[in-house]
Image: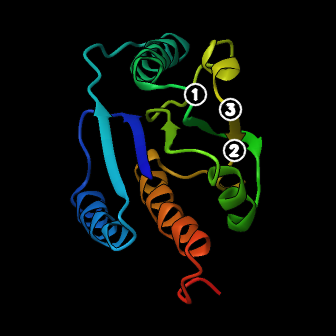
């Protein structure tokens, strides 16, 4: 299984890169792969809604190109549904590819077609978290999902 975490950012903090390296190694034990795709923002806009639209276009256009019927596309947003890791593992089990789509630091544009394109809309937490922290949470969930699907004792 291939897990992709796709986000829009111009710079990741060192602790994010360190965590991703850790989770990539962990997923290899399950013959799975974790990729972090960071789409670079080439325009910085003063208007937040315009920036959201621009960032969401970047995210959507990239993910749409690499998706197929074997891909589960998950948009992460505070307005999404909260589900357990066990339930998420059930949903993921029928797919070969999983894309976690995380908006940039201003979020995902509400009126965008990315919402109808995505198979799932999930919320990590009712708390406000930076997109960089969300990257690490998604990597941890990929590890947990595989632990559940493979019956690994790590997940209890």
Percent x, y of residue 151: 59, 80
Q: Earlier in the sequence, mark 3 or mark 1?
A: 1
Check disc 2 and report the residue beneath it.
122
Marks 3 and 1, how far apart at CA: 11 Å
The residue that appears at 30% across and 36% down in the rendered structure is 38
Marks 2 and 1, how far apart at CA: 20 Å
Marks 3 and 2, how far apart at CA: 10 Å
Kind of element beneath mark 3 = loop
- Give left or right: position of 5 versus 41: right
Crowd band around label 2 with a 10 angstrom C-alpha radius: few (<14), some (14–19), many (20+): some
Kind of element beneath mark 2 = strand
The residue that appears at 59% across and 83% down in the rendered structure is 155
Check disc 1 and report the residue beneath it.
69
Check disc 3 and report the residue beneath it.
119
Q: Which of marks 3 and 1 is in front?
A: 1
Percent x, y of residue 140: 48, 66
């Amino acid at each position: 299984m291939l897990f992709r975490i796709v986000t829009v950012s111009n710079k990741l903090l060192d602790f994010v890169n360190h965590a991703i390296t850790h989770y990539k190694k962990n997923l290899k034990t399950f013959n799975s792969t974790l990729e972090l795709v960071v789409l670079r923002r080439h325009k910085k806009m003063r208007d937040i809604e315009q920036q959201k639209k621009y960032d969401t276009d970047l995210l959507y256009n990239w993910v749409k190109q690499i998706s197929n019927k074997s891909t589960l596309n998950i948009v992460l947003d505070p307005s999404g549904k909260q589900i357990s890791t066990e339930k998420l593992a059930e949903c993921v089990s029928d797919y070969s590819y999983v894309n976690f789509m995380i908006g940039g630091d201003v979020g995902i544009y509400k009126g965008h077609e990315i919402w109808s394109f995505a198979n799932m809309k999930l919320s990590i937490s009712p708390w406000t978290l930076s997109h960089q922290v969300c990257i690490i949470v998604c990597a941890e969930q990929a590890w947990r999902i595989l632990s559940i699907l493979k019956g690994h004792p790590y997940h209890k």
